[in-house]
Image: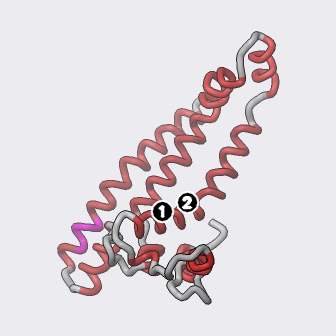
Amino acid sequence: MAISMVGAGVIWNFIYEADPNIGLLNAIWTTLGGTPQAWTSLLQPWNNFFLIVIVIWLQTGFAMVLFSAAIKGIPGEILEAARVDGATELQVFFGIMIPYIMPTIITVSTTVVIFTLKIFDIVWVMTGGQFGTQVIATQFYREYFTNRNFGYGSAIAIVLLLAVVPVMIYNLKQFGEREAF
């Protein structure tokens, strides 16, 4: 990541700010004739949508770098041979490129899943886990640190661990199979 999660949360907090003099989204919205909105405190699903936009913004660069490297790693001779044999671009894409970059697709997918399961910073900075945006990590934080309910907070952390570990094991198995080639 080129920017920290808290930094991204602060930047997007300014973008979503209800005051049109500060918030970019409300400046555009009021210019189009709308009334200023508190975007992240709207009812579901809109507040979750605005948080998803932030996560996509953060993860896109990472994913694109890996996908770009994987696609550039496909030998040109294979693609050229398929085209000479009469394959359409769609057949080349689904029959050669996708299978060739499948390990990268799996790596990016598992990384995004793990990131999503353990997300805390952005949700906490943007909404404090309110307005229907509570995730596992914010629930853990509230139970453990705010409510001082250590047993329940620890149980939530274990559930989060149990959700992340199978994804990590799958990713490690895929990596091991790739190294065997």
Amino acid carrying mark 1 in the image: Ile
State whether the magenta stretch is mostly helix, strand or loop.
Answer: helix
Question: Hey, which residue is sitting farthest top in the picture?
Answer: 85
| Residue 110: mark | none
Q: Is residue 1 left or right of residue 150?
A: right
Residue 161 lies in what quarter of the image?
bottom left
Q: Which residues are magenta?
A: 153-157
Q: Is residue 21 left or right of residue 168?
A: right
x, y percent for residue 54? 54, 67
x, y percent for residue 167? 41, 48
Q: Residues within 10 Å of mark 2 (few under 14, many from 20)?
A: few
Residue 103 lies in what quarter of the image?
top right
Q: Residues within 10 Å of mark 1 (few under 14, many from 20)?
A: some
| Residue 56: mark | 2
Q: Which residue is mark 1?
A: 52
Label 1, secondary structure: give it: helix
x, y percent for residue 36? 50, 82
Dots 2 and 1: beta carbons under 8 Å? yes
- Let me know if residue 136 is in the magenta part: no
Q: Is residue 7 visible?
A: no
Label 2, secondary structure: give it: helix
Q: Residue at x 48, y 67 (%)?
A: 50
Question: In what quadrant of the picture does the C terminus appear?
Answer: top right
Q: Residue at x 69, y 23 (%)?
A: 92
Q: Residue at x 61, y 89 (%)?
A: 21
Question: In what quadrant of the picture does the N terminus appear?
Answer: bottom right
x, y percent for residue 158? 27, 63
